Image: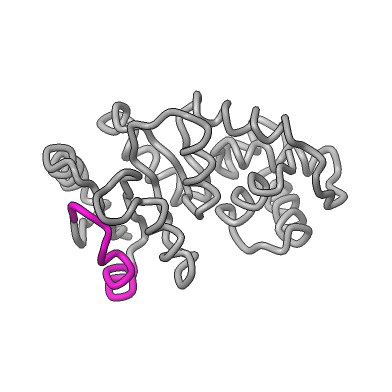
Amino acid sequence: MTKQLLIYEDNDALRKSLEELLMLSDEFVVLGSYENCLQAEAHVHSSQPDVILMDIDMPGMTGIEAVKKIRQFDTAAAIIMLTVFDDNKHVLDAICAGASGYLLKKHASEKLIPAIKEVLDGGAPMSPAIAKMVIHSMQQNAGIKQYNFSVREKQILELLCKGNSYKMISAQAGIAFETVRSYIKNIYEKLQVHSATEAVSKAIKERLI
């Protein structure tokens, strides 16, 4: 099934490159491509995209602010942040705002399509360096709030926070795909969330791993 996307990026050349890259695949349709996110709420309301590509630093309203507004009424759309920033603050701000994944612009040409497919498969794609920083930050602040996770549940949650899909978690943890689903269902119940995005966001906000 064709997946529908919206793009928000103030760099004209990059925005057009992203459009062209996605147009090369018959798996994706770009519903709209914009230089700012001032009308993002209206766009998402009307088009109900599967995936949103969102630059962090844009004039008028930042991508992080736009994500917060979108998440007030839409938790289903996957949101991948595109940015030049490579530091903890922006990483954590973006993910805590509700971003589904995070990709540095310099890697967009080679990793955008895999990242989109990953997020649609239930993962939370991030560059390795960013995933490492996020996990390090979480580990430094562990234990603020306890949800009585088992050792295996903590492992699964950490793998989820690193951007792994269920299939990748299954392979890395050495357990069956359906077992992964069962563990993640338990994690969702303990965290009182309903998606991988919400679980990752809550885990980071509360420094659970």
Q: Is residue 25 above or below residue 130?
A: below
Image: magenta residue range: 34-48
Drawn side of residue 101 relative to residue 38, left or right: right
Hey, which quadrant is residue 34 in on the image?
Answer: bottom left
- Tell me how many marks there are: 0
Horizontal and vertical percent for residue 11?
Answer: 17, 41
Q: Quadrant of the C terminus?
A: top right
Horizontal and vertical percent for residue 107?
Answer: 32, 28
- Queried whether the magenta region covers residue 40, the answer comes back as yes
Q: Quadrant of the N terminus?
A: bottom left
Horizontal and vertical percent for residue 180?
Answer: 70, 46
Q: Residue at x 29, y 73 (%)?
A: 42
Q: How is the image coloured?
A: one colour
Q: Residue at x 73, y 48 (%)?
A: 179
Q: Residue at x 56, y 38 (%)?
A: 164
- Queried whether the magenta region covers residue 167, the answer comes back as no
Horizontal and vertical percent for residue 202?
Answer: 65, 52
Q: Residue furthest front?
A: 60
- Using the image as rendered, state which of residue 178 and residue 106 is in the foreground: 106
Q: Residue furthest bottom?
A: 46
Drawn side of residue 42 relative to residue 122, left or right: left
Drawn side of residue 10 relative to residue 57, left or right: left
Q: Residue at x 47, y 29 (%)?
A: 87
- Using the image as rendered, state which of residue 85 and residue 5 is in the foreground: 85
